[in-house]
Structure formats: C-alpha cells, structure tokens
C-alpha cells in the first residue's frame, strides 16, 4: 500500500496527521519536514517572555515522540524539492517517495523588505521556533546593555504582540509602521488608538507614517534610518512586516495558485490526490466561492479535520466559521473580526463603551448589517454574543461614529 505523505510538520501538518490517525490507525503515513520536526505552538513565540519560556522549552514533543504517537515515519531535516503529480512521487534530499495521497502543509515565508545598508542582513524575522531561538540569543547577547533596544518593523498582529511581550520584560521597544496607527489592517481606529496608548504606557515608542530604509552599523549598535529622516538606534532589529504563502513546491507541481495554493471546499488542489492547508493555502468559501488566505490556527483545525476525512475516502467540506483573531497584547487584549477589505470604504464603525469600561467597535456594511467587530477586554461570552450578531442589523448603544 502506498503511503499518505504530508509535507511540513507545523501545526497544519501535525493537525491533519492527528485527525487522520483518529479515523485510520493503519494506513502508512509519512511526514517529511525541512526542520527538526519538534511539536510546538507557534502563537506562543510572541508571548514567550510573559510565559517565562525559552525557545527550547516551547517544544513539547520531539519528532521521535510525535512519530510514535502518530504511528508515522517522520523524515526530519529533509527538504522536498519536487513533486511529480502524474507519477505521484515526491523528490527529496533523501530520495524519491511514492504517495497515494499528498498533503502540502508547507507554511509561509517572511516578506523581505529590501532594506539598504551594510547591516541590512542583521535584520531578523521570527516564523519558526528556530528563528525565535536565534532572536533570543541576540536579546541575551552579553554585548547588549540591559534594557536591550529592539526596533520592530511592522505594527501588525505579530509586531504588536512582540512589542508588548518585550516591553513587559523590561526591554526598550520601538515600533515602526507606514500606517497612521497600529493594527491598521485589522482593528477599528478607536481600538488601534487605545492599543497605542496602552503600549506607550508600557514604554513602547512609535514611529508611524514612515518606513525603515537603511540599516547600518553604529559604534556598538545598529542604526535604522527612517524615510521621515529620523534615525533609531537598536541592539536588535526584528522585521514583522508579514508573511507570504510558500508557493515554491506548488509552482514545481504546476498547481493552481493565487496568493496561496488554491484549494476547493474539500481541501483538494488543482491536481488529483494533492491537498493543502495552513499558511500556504488559499481556502474557498462555501458561502460564495470566494478564496482567501487565512494564516490563523482556527482554519487549520477545521481544515485538518475535514481533509483527514477526505483522505479516508469520505465526502466532506471545510466549513469555515467566522472565528475572532485574538491579539495577545496583555496591555490591551483584543478579539477582532476584521471587515473584508473591499467593504471598509463603504461601511462604518460604531463605537460603544460599556458601563464596565469595555470597548466594543462594530462595523456595519453599506446595507447596515454587522460585518466585523473588535472588543477589549473580552471573554467567551462577549465574543459569542458578537459572533451571533454577524450578518444582522443589530441595534447597539453606539455612542460615536468614527468613520
Ligand atoms: C509569532 C506568531 C504568533 C502567532 N500568533 C497567532 C495567534 O495568536 N493566533 C492564531 O490563530 N495564529 C497565530 N499565528 C499564526 C499561526 O501560528 C500560523 O497560522 C500557523 O502556525 C501556521 O502553521 P503551518 O503548519 O501552516 O505553517 P508552518 O508552521 O510554517 O509549518 C510549515 C512546515 O513546512 C515545512 N516545509 C516547508 N517547505 C518544505 C519543503 N520544501 N520540504 C520539507 N518541509 C518543508 C517547514 O519545515 C515546517 O515544518 C502566529 C504566527 C506567528 C509567527
């Protein structure tokens, strides 16, 4: 019997493997991964200081333990270089493997900014526990005085979470972003302003409406020159400007791609017996057939369960439900359902502050229907209440219209 092969051992690869094994205990399962295959929760990387964790402490199970748990063979430190969809083989550093069905869970790659300056190659990014280990080694380098000066490029989800975590640990953080506010792509203006106030109170310095252009060596530090003429001195520079789905294998296999690897509602790519999920995938909506990359955990869980069933021969669809993005900024914790970018210009945000001081921002589309929200602080009850109102003309105690 030819095996099921999963490429990638991040949360997407391991979720589909685990779900598959709940349904089928015996079909041969091979996982192939370029990394060492240790299981860890990637969202923990941006609040590791708050949890008092070093990089190595975040790996809860080694590849050997995972292989045993999943009754699988895990080829670690093995790079897949090619896929032959017609012959149903994958080519790796360690030889060629035949598959019955193949799952791509190859994740995304950090976007590189093309910065100028002789120290541009010193800029770090964190999208893996190994990257985090390198980042922490720079933070704790004996050549740095304490507090360590960290400049973060990008005030989106990951940049803001790292800023709060590092500032909470006593480091001196500067956030740089081309937008006029943090979390501009995700949050209502009022919530961005409140987050900025909370992070500033933690000691974070903001340089907004500008970008980094050049990184050079100073006497004992890095010097980041901004487009607005300012210069920031830093011991460590972290780029958090976003990720791009990894399409390299999809291109080799000539799969249909958009921003990500396009999959239908059952997780199937444009090639027979090849599936995809996670940060590399572009999901198709059951509701209207539109496609979206969704680089979050909740879609991985839903897609992992569905694809596992499809791998056993069951006819199943990936039924993605709206799930709030939780921003792990303890200074101002947020739960967000951002409105779709194409409706932002035609709808409006309405803000409410409850008697208990909770900020709720609701986004109404041009038809007056609830199409997004943000709330801080939040708990399960308020998240469920707001979710239940999506698509409805909910009456609110809104007191301010912000856009
Ligand atoms: C700092 C941080 C904080 C986050 N916080 C949250 C959060 O709070 N909530 C949330 O919902 N989401 C969060 N996310 C996003 C979430 O963690 C990701 O969506 C998810 O972990 C992606 O998993 P993945 O398995 O698709 O990709 P990855 O974890 O990137 O795994 C890809 C795997 O593919 C392997 N691979 C790639 N190419 C090859 C190849 N050619 N050959 C062999 N192996 C290959 C890699 O080695 C790796 O094992 C966060 C992300 C980051 C970076």
Image (spheres, rainbow, N blue to C red):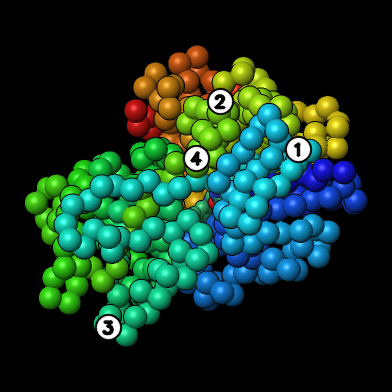
As measured in the structure, the alpha-carbon distance from the residue carrying label 1 to the one carrying label 4 is 19 Å
Of marks 4 and 3, the one in the foreground: 4
Residues packed near mark 3 inside 10 Å, few (<14), some (14 to 19) or many (20 plus): few
In percent of the image, x 60 and y 30: which residue is there?
283
Q: Earlier in the sequence, mark 3 or mark 2?
A: 3
In percent of the image, x 49 and y 27: which residue is there?
258
Q: How many marks?
A: 4
| Mark number displayed over residue 256 | 2
Measured as percent of width and height from the top left, residue 1 is found at: 87, 43
Q: Name the residue furthest top.
A: 367
| Mark number displayed over residue 248 | 4
Of marks 3 and 1, the one in the foreground: 1
Q: Is residue 308 left or right of residue 222?
A: right
**Helix, strand, or loop for circle 1?**
strand
Q: Is residue 155 above or below residue 344?
A: below
As measured in the structure, the alpha-carbon distance from the residue carrying label 1 to the one carrying label 2 is 17 Å
Q: Earlier in the sequence, mark 4 or mark 3?
A: 3
Residues packed near mark 1 inside 10 Å, few (<14), some (14 to 19) or many (20 plus): some
Find out if the beta carbon at label 4 lies less than 8 Å from the nearest ligand 1 atom: yes
As measured in the structure, the alpha-carbon distance from the residue carrying label 3 to the one carrying label 2 is 48 Å
- Nearest the viewer among 286 and 254 is 254
Q: Which residue has dot 3 on it?
A: 143
Q: Which residue has dot 1 on it?
A: 101
As measured in the structure, the alpha-carbon distance from the residue carrying label 4 to the one carrying label 3 is 38 Å
Q: Is residue 87 above or below residue 181?
A: above
């Amino acid at each position: 019997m030819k095996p099921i092969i999963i490429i990638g051992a991040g949360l997407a690869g391991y979720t589909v493997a685990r779900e598959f094994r709940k349904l089928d205990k015996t079909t041969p399962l091979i996982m192939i991964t370029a990394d060492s295959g240790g299981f860890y929760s990637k969202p923990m990387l941006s609040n590791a200081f708050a949890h008092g964790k070093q990089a190595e402490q975040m790996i809860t199970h080694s590849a050997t333990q995972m292989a045993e748990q999943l009754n699988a063979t895990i080829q670690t430190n093995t790079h897949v270089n090619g896929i032959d969809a017609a012959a149903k083989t994958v080519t790796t550093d360690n030889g060629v493997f035949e598959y019955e069905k193949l799952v791509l869970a190859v994740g995304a790659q950090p976007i590189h900014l093309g910065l100028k300056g002789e120290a541009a190659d010193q800029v770090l990014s964190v999208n893996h526990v190994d990257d985090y280990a390198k980042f922490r080694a720079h933070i704790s380098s004996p050549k740095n005085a304490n507090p360590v000066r960290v400049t973060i490029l990008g005030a989106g989800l990951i940049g803001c979470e790292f800023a709060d975590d590092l500032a909470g640990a006593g480091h001196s953080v500067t956030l740089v972003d081309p937008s006029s506010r943090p979390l501009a792509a995700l949050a209502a203006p009022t919530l961005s302003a409140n987050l900025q106030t909370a992070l500033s109170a933690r000691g974070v310095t903001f340089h907004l409406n500008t970008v980094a252009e050049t990184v050079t060596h100073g006497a004992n530090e890095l010097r980041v020159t901004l487009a607005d003429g300012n210069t920031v001195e830093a011991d460590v520079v972290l780029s958090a400007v976003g990720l791009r789905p990894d399409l390299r294998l999809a291109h080799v296999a000539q799969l249909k791609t958009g921003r990500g690897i396009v999959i239908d509602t059952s997780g199937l790519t444009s090639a027979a017996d090849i599936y995809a999920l996670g940060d590399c995938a572009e999901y198709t909506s059951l509701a209207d057939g539109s496609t979206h990359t969704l680089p979050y955990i909740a879609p991985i869980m839903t897609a992992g369960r569905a694809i596992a069933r499809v791998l056993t021969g069951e006819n199943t669809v990936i039924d993605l439900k709206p799930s709030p993005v939780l921003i792990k900024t303890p200074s101002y914790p947020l739960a967000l359902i951002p409105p779709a970018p194409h409706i932002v210009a035609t709808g409006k945000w309405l803000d409410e502050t409850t008697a208990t001081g909770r900020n709720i921002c609701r986004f109404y589309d041009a038809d007056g229907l609830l199409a997004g929200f943000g709330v801080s602080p939040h708990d399960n009850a308020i998240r469920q209440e707001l979710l239940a109102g999506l698509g409805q003309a909910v009456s609110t105690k809104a007191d301010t219209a912000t856009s």
